[in-house]
Amino acid sequence: MRWHAGFNSVPMTDATLVRQVLQGDTAAFTLLVDRHAAACTRFAMRMLGNREDAEDATQESFLRAYRSLARYEERQAFRTWLFQILVNRCRTAAVRRQRRQRMFLVDDNAVASASVRPLADSTELRAELQRAIGRLDPEQREAFLLKHVEQLSYDEMAEATGVSVSALKMRVKRACDRLQWLLRENGEGEVSDVGT
Amino acid sequence: MSEPDDPRWLSEISDELREEVPVRAAWRSRLLDDVARSRRPALGDTYDDRIDDTGAAIAEATPRRRRIVLTPIASVAAALLFAALGAGVTYVALSGRNANTLAPIASASRDSATRTTTTLVSTQTPADRETVRFALSAPNASRVALVGSFNEWNPIATPLVRDPATGTWMVSLRLPPGRHVYAFVVDGDVTADPAAPRAADDDFGSANSVVLVTGNAS
């Protein structure tokens, strides 16, 4: 495999790996998967609230990325390009799930600890946060996660979402305000799951 | 965790949410198997599966332009042909003006007390697509979007614009000939078009609507 070029070789950039895939070294795509799968799965899980849907969306995103790899342009970070696909896959999955009339469930841990208070450890804190994230408007959730969790710049977010920078800033601001309110509310009263 | 009013809370919750989600080995293996079975990408590919994740929304996609080069003789012949066609079209239009021969290809309109939906297939475009106008009267809605097979059910891709005078939400799309399944998303709720035919089958158990684009304006 050409991406193990030698003892002193420097890590291949994503763009280099893409070129190698397009030149026939399809094994280089494995490294791209290994570099980005965890972040993609994390974003999808935070967006969709369960691992099954998240893995489906992430898998579909990688397959679409692979098939359309020739359309990737190096002026854009591969990660941003991949997130552009993933964002759309998550949007689609959310609508499909809504059409199946499934409730938004965070994950097994979150469901099991849904009524546990006060927060005792990191797992419970994460569960509460995911519940709060799940109650955000999907557009706000998407913008918040891209900004504060995946740490994309606003320009990268605009490329990934097709939304203007000013609109994204507004969504992030509103998401923060809403999260503050939700987290405060959780300390004072009952929180229930809602559909997305 | 610090109190929500404390600025530190944002970095704290971001750190928590940034906790890595482990990638399952079985999932990775399945993905790589699927990749291995996929067609190998190559330089110069123009892969397009109609779902344009990496470009503009399909509804706004512009058709590819072809450049046609004519020889002088062919140019004269083409000019004569167009002149003859123009005269014929003018004659047909004038003779049929009172007989509504230029009516829309297909239309479905129904009024209801609360919501009125109108779907019109109107003009045929040069790119063999037709302009389809989707309209929904929902005066109390704050946001309406169109989802369907033509935009991969993306609830953000095709928002409708509200006419403040009537409370009707509208959007026009240029769709290729064929059967298109769609629904409206009204303030987050997926709703079939009450004035359009229902899709015979839905993968997820909820009703959708259908619009047929004939691709033939006559």
Image (cartoon, coloured by chain):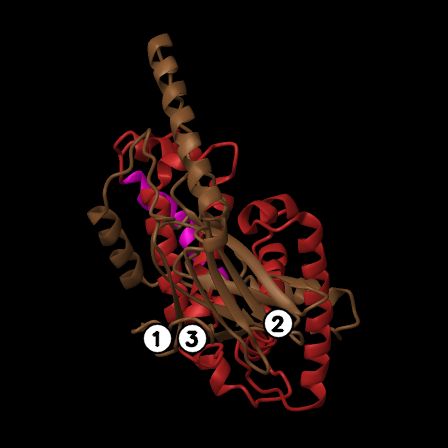
Chain colours: A red, B brown
Q: Is residue A116 left or right of residue A66?
A: right
Q: Which mark is residue B204?
A: 1
Q: Given the image, on which type of amino acid does mark 1 rest?
A: Phe
**Residue at mark 1: chain:** B
Cα distance between the residues tagged 2 and 1: 24 Å
Viewport quadrant of the N terminus of chain A: top left
Q: Which residue is mark 2?
A: A136
Question: Is the residue under label 1 in contact with that under label 2 (CB below 8 Å)?
Answer: no
Which amino acid does the dot numbered 3 rest on?
Arg
Viewer can see residue A104: yes
Q: Nearer the viewer, mark 2 or mark 3?
A: 3
Above/below status of B173 relative to A113? above
x 31%, y 35%: residue: A21
* Crowd rating for badge 2 (residues with CA inside 10 Å; few <14, some 14–19, many 20+): many
Q: CA distance from mark 1 to mark 3?
A: 6 Å
The secondary structure type at the circle numbered 2 is loop
Report the residue marked by disc 3. A99
Q: Nearer the viewer, residue A57 or A129?
A: A57
Residue A32 lies within the magenta run: yes
Please say if the residues under marks 1 and 3 sit with CB atoms less than 8 Å apart.
yes
Residue A69 pos. (x, y %) = 36, 39
Regarding mark 3 in the picture, which secondary structure is present there?
helix
Closer to the camera, B174 or B166? B166
